[in-house]
Image (cartoon, grey):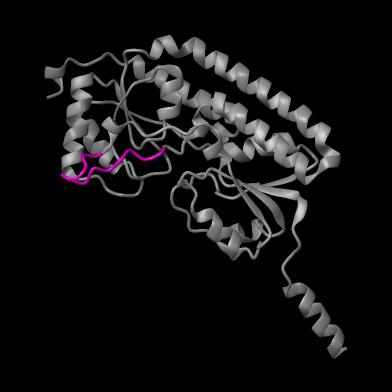
């Protein structure tokens, strides 16, 4: 009986072997595509619970346990979900592969004019923008990368992954077409964003981001930078300021009062009831832009 107890204890304490039919994704937009590609063939887990910021994550034991037994985790990379490697290690998933998708979809730099003023003589270069998922054209590339990864994990399910991947790509193409048809209404109506999450969407659909309140997520902007944001908002005739549900909107409210801007909330990550598919996530941004451009532009002297 003692030997049997020792054996049971040894089994229960051992690390679970990776299951090729279990994968995970760091953030909701990647998770939504992965679960649709996987269908009934894969068990897909979401690592970052909806409502949390992508840049900083303090996981609970339950969050860690969800990764146990996974064989592959889709991540953003580009400095956004750096917490993912520690989480995988804490889950004891030594053999899990983290596949960072961002470097493979033509990442772009953050526009230098939206950054906080650099200290004199620092010569800091613009960082790479990791928020590629807000461009559905790039996400069609992501689908291909995910399909290939799933086929490598589970060759027998390859035809199904390809078929479902094509269906997802077709849906993303329809989404892109709809957004492209709506983009003319957003021209000439600059917005101020809370942090730099919308640049990929903005480039694709002609939206002007006049300024960013918090260039470094989680780092409170300086008084000098806030003054710069107010000035840019006035000079460019910004229509609105966009906050995000994952982040403290306090500094944004100060800017909005100073610049005379209405405030709208935009969710750049999704996973909540109103944004429980990738398509809903981007259509929510489009709907918020529609509301923002309906606000009459204030004359510069009216907001000083």
> Left or right of 256: which side holds 54?
right
Q: How many marks?
A: 0
Q: Residue at x 40, y 10 (%)?
A: 185
- Residue 222: quadrant of the picture: top left
> Left or right of 149: which side holds 303?
left
Residue 272 in view (yes/no): no
Quadrant where the N terminus lies?
Answer: bottom right
Looking at the picture, how far across and down is residue 27, in whole percent?
Answer: 55, 43
Q: Main secondary structure of the magenta part?
A: loop
Looking at the picture, how far across and down is residue 194, in whole percent?
Answer: 33, 36
Q: Nearer the viewer, residue 294 or 55?
A: 55
The residue positioned farthest toward the bottom in the image shown? 2
Q: Residue at x 81, y 32 (%)?
A: 160
Q: Please determine whether, in this image, residue 241 is positioned above or below residue 15.
A: above
Q: Nearer the viewer, residue 284 or 213?
A: 213
Residue 153 in view (yes/no): yes
Task: Tell whether position 119 is magenta.
Answer: yes
Looking at the picture, how far across and down is residue 133, in whole percent?
Answer: 52, 33
Task: Tell whether position 125 is magenta.
Answer: yes
Quadrant where the C terminus lies?
Answer: top left
Q: Which residues are magenta?
A: 116-128
Q: Nearer the viewer, residue 121 or 233?
A: 121
Q: Residue at x 33, y 38 (%)?
A: 126
> Left or right of 178: which side holds 144?
right
């Amino acid at each position: 009986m003692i030997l049997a107890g020792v054996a049971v204890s040894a089994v229960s304490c051992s690390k679970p072997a990776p299951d090729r039919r279990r994968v995970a994704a760091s953030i909701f937009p990647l998770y939504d595509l992965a679960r649709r590609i996987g269908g009934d063939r894969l068990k897909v887990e979401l690592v970052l619970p909806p409502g949390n910021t992508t840049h900083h994550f303090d996981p609970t034991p339950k969050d860690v346990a969800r990764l146990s037994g996974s064989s592959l985790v889709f991540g953003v990379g580009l400095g956004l979900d750096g917490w993912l490697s520690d989480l995988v290690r804490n889950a004891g998933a030594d053999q899990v592969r983290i596949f960072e998708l961002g470097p493979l979809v033509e990442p772009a730099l953050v526009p230098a004019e939206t950054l906080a003023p650099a200290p004199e003589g620092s010569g800091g270069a613009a960082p790479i923008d990791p928020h590629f998922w807000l461009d559905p054209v790039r996400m069609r590339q992501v689908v291909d990368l995910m399909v290939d990864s799933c086929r490598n994990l589970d060759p027998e399910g390859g035809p199904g992954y390809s078929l479902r991947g094509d269906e997802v790509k077709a849906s993303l193409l329809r989404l892109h077409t709809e957004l492209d048809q709506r983009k003319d209404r957003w021209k000439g109506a600059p917005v101020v964003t809370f942090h730099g999450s919308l640049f990929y969407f903005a480039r694709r659909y002609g939206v002007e981001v006049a300024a960013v309140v918090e260039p470094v997520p989680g780092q409170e902007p300086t008084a000098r930078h806030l003054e710069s944001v107010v000035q840019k908002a006035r000079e460019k005739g910004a229509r609105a300021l966009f906050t995000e549900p994952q982040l403290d909107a306090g500094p944004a409210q100060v800017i909005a009062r100073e610049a005379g801007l209405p405030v709208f909330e935009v969710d750049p990550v999704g996973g909540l009831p109103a944004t429980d598919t990738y398509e809903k996530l981007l259509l929510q941004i489009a709907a918020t832009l529609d509301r923002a451009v309906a606000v009459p532009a204030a004359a510069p002297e009216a907001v000083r």
